[in-house]
Amino acid sequence: MHYITFLDDRSQKISRARRKVNIKLRGYDSKTWVLPELSYLSLPAYAIAYSPCPTYRDIYLEFVQGMQRPFTWGRYKGKLIDKIYKRVHSTCEKCVSTGRLRDFDMWNQVIQMRGSIVEEAKRTHSGDLAAISPQPSTRLVSSLDEELKMLVTFEAGLTSALMNYQISKVESPNLRRIFSQYFDFNVDLSFRALHQGFRGDATPDFVYKHQVVGDIKSGKWQAFFEQTMIAYALAYEEHTRQNMDYGVIFHVGIEPRRTIPAHYRTRFEILDDPKRMRYIAVRNRKFEIIHNRIDPGLPTNSEACDPECSFFMNCRGNAHA
């Protein structure tokens, strides 16, 4: 997650983008709200922002047919990765809490906590692991430990290097101030956005510098990731009545040939009106499917079905047996 700070510090993308923004469709504008005839409906955040199926048949199966969304290995792994990054952030924050420069050694302090950070994430989601069907192999579960530790190691090295660099430029550095200035992530924000169709709170993974809504994604890149940024930006705007012009997908790739996580798919976007219009059309289509109670059917091309979709086996299992 702190990789976003590195990108911003190196490229100044946010500062440059600020001069280009001209957005009219806002979350507090009724033009972005769920259509009046569909406003009696609502969906949990994951169903609004997550669209693995090109025809949105997953929405029909879960919210019309009442099928329980199966829990997959990919979802479990994604939840652990989210937890890891948020826990590393809070650990780094504690490293500067004393404000004493002579005690500051962020790299070693985070690395010493690496094992406990991973174990805490696993304990938090132990019930999710038990819910996966079929159960993952012991080898797959054990290899995940090393992958998660790799994420902690990289994040600790990147964060401590950026902190050390900033400290080295100042005669009398204020550790807390430097950290809050460069690693300004809020990971505890929740928004009420009933007009956007959210059931319960909309909770992005983070908001960076109060101007970029962010989501952590892993696995292969999906076209619908853009919709996630828009969904949370509109929810933020409805809740706060303040503009949210930017979004970022912090993409975490774990590849067998690498000992360093791959972040090259991470994308920073201006959340302009064309993107918002595309998202609103998709969201309204989901609500129409529930309202009309008509099965939208399978995608014509079976290759369009993502094996990571929770309902893949229900829709395509026999065909791929």
Image (cartoon, grey):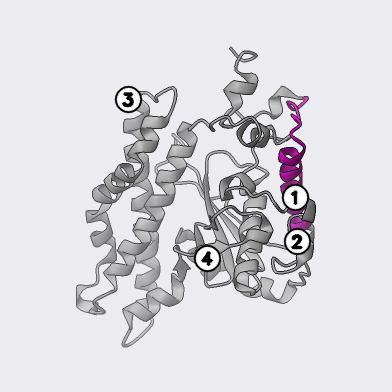
Q: Where is residue 107 in the image (x, y as percent from the top left)?
A: 28, 61
Res 168 seen here: no
Q: Are the two marked residues, 1 and 4, in contact with CB atoms closer than 8 angstroms? A: no
Quote the CA–CA distance across marks 4 and 2: 21 Å
Quote the CA–CA distance across marks 3 and 1: 46 Å
- Single out the mark in the foreground, 1 or 4: 1
Using the rendered view, name the quadrant where residue 302 is placed: top right
- Single out the mark in the foreground, 4 or 2: 2
- At numbered mark 4, what does the secondary structure look like: helix, strand or loop? strand
Q: Is residue 25 above or below residue 305?
A: below
- Callout 4, which amino acid? Val
- Callout 3, which amino acid? Thr
Quote the CA–CA distance across marks 4 and 3: 36 Å
Q: Mark 2 points at which residue?
A: 32
Q: Is residue 292 magenta?
A: yes
> What is the span of residues highlighted in magenta in the rendered image?
275-300
Q: In this view, does 174 lie above or below 272?
A: below
- At numbered mark 1, what does the secondary structure look like: helix, strand or loop? helix
Using the rendered view, name the quadrant where residue 127 is placed: top left
Q: Position of residue 214 (x, y in %)?
A: 55, 59
Count residues near mark 3 (Cα–Cα under 10 Å), then give few for <14, some for 14-19, many for 20+.
Answer: few
Quote the CA–CA distance across marks 2 and 3: 47 Å
Q: Mark 4 points at which residue?
A: 207
Q: Where is residue 101 in the image (x, y as percent from the top left)?
A: 24, 78
Q: Residue furthest bottom?
A: 171
In this rendered view, identify the residue nearer to me: 223 or 288.
288
Q: Mark 1 points at which residue?
A: 38
Quote the CA–CA distance across marks 1 and 2: 13 Å
First in residue order: circle 2 vs circle 3: 2
